[in-house]
Image (tube, rainbow, N blue to C red):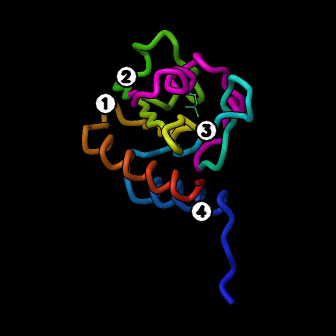
């Protein structure tokens, strides 16, 4: 009989595949809305451990996406004033929201050690990944 993988196992696998196959994806993780609180909670991820397990809505790149419902591509993190640094090796970041039944339930967050690496192709690709994730979660 086939063992059913948990949602977290499947999300972790997605992180692993992305980090292993795309050279400039160096930290890949998910944040999700934490119950009915106005904050995000870290989900499955690969890369350096982060202190930022809880992020209030509005704070940092992730917290801004939680309220804007829009993709956020940051070519140079040093140029952002509302940014939460996880590691000094991070040069750029991309955050794409995940919608379930039209509601912004969380996001995929990717950090890169390469300056300005993300193109519209990354946005379209990660939007596709986020739709697949929404299907896993629904
Ligand atoms: N840099 C993010 C915080 C999360 S870490 O990148 C894992 C931000 O500014 O929201």
The residues tagged by marks 3 and 2 sit, at their Cα atoms, a distance apart of: 21 Å
Q: Mark 4 points at which residue?
A: 10
Q: Distance between the residues labelled 4 and 3?
A: 15 Å
Badge 1 is on which residue?
A: 116
Q: Image check: 124 left or right of 29?
A: left
Mark nearer the N terminus (2 vs 4): 4
Cα separation between marks 2 and 4: 30 Å
Taking 81 as reference, is 50 above or below it? below
Mark 1 secondary-structure assignment = loop
Q: Do the residues labelled 2 and 1 touch (CB within 8 Å)?
A: yes
Q: Residue 31 carries which label?
A: 3
Q: In this view, does 106 lie above or below 64?
A: below
Q: What stretch is highlighted in magenta?
A: 46-72
Label 2 CA crowd tier, 10 Å (few <14, some 14–19, many 20+) = some
| Residue 63, quarter of the rendered image | top right
Ligand 1 falls in quadrant: top right
Question: Which quadrant is home to the N terminus?
Answer: bottom right
Q: Which residue lies furthest to the top in this view?
A: 81
- Does 63 appear in magenta? yes
Q: Decide which of tag 4 and tag 3 comes sooner along the chain.
A: 4
């Amino acid at each position: 009989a086939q063992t059913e993988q948990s949602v977290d196992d499947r999300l972790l696998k997605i992180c692993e595949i992305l980090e292993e196959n795309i050279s400039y994806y160096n930290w890949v993780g998910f944040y999700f809305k934490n119950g009915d609180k106005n904050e995000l909670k870290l989900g499955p991820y690969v890369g350096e451990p982060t202190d930022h397990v809880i992020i209030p809505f509005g704070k940092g790149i992730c917290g801004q996406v939680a309220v804007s419902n829009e993709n956020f591509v940051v070519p140079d993190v040093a140029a952002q004033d509302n940014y939460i640094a996880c590691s000094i090796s991070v040069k750029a970041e991309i955050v794409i929201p995940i919608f379930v039944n039209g509601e912004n339930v969380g996001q995929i967050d990717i950090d890169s050690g390469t300056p300005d690496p993300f193109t519209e192709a990354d946005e379209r690709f990660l939007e596709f990944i986020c739709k697949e994730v929404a299907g896993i979660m629904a």
